[in-house]
Amino acid sequence: NGGSQNWHFGVNYTDWSLKNGPFYINDTLVFKYDPPSNTTFPHSVYLLPHLKSFLNCDLRKAKMIANPTQGSGNGFEFVLKKWKPYYFACGERNGFHCKVGLMKFAIVSPLRRRH
């Protein structure tokens, strides 16, 4: 989640993920955002296939993991199941929210927690 700010336009989520990381396998990310209405822009959550698509906010091969209504209430939960980089972005407005609104972040989870 974006701390108390939820998933919305204009928050630097890369900064957030660095401050709140590291994240580990089986950690759960929660994306909370208001469903579309007359007063809110729709948001969604996409998983991008690789770093280049992430850097360019290129959604052509991205996979939607949460649609604009799934962030309401308790939010959409995503569990980090594999040891690999995850590239998240908002898919709305054809990448505009990702490019201009900074609605993207990457997570590379270490294999296990240090005890």
Image (tube, rainbow, N blue to C red):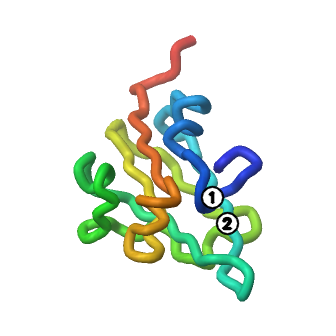
Label 1 CA crowd tier, 10 Å (few <14, some 14–19, many 20+): many
Relative to the observer, which residue lies in front, 30 or 33?
Answer: 33
Residue 101, x across and y down, in percent: 52, 59
38 and 1: which one is in front?
Answer: 38
- Distance Cα–Cα, label 1 vs label 2: 5 Å
**Relative to 39, 57 lies left or right:** left
Q: Quadrant of residue 43?
A: bottom right
Check disc 1 and report its element: helix, strand or loop. loop
- Residue 9 horizontal/vertical position (percent): 59, 61
Q: Quadrant of residue 39?
A: bottom right
Instruction: Work out which quarter of the rendered image holds the C terminus and state it.
Output: top right
Task: Say which residue label 1 marks.
Answer: 7
- Relative to the observer, which residue lies in front, 77 or 99? 99
| Mark found first going from the N terminus, 1 or 2 | 1
Side of 100 where 4 appears, left or right: right
Is the residue under label 2 in contact with that under label 1 (CB below 8 Å)? Answer: yes
Q: Which residue is mark 2?
A: 33
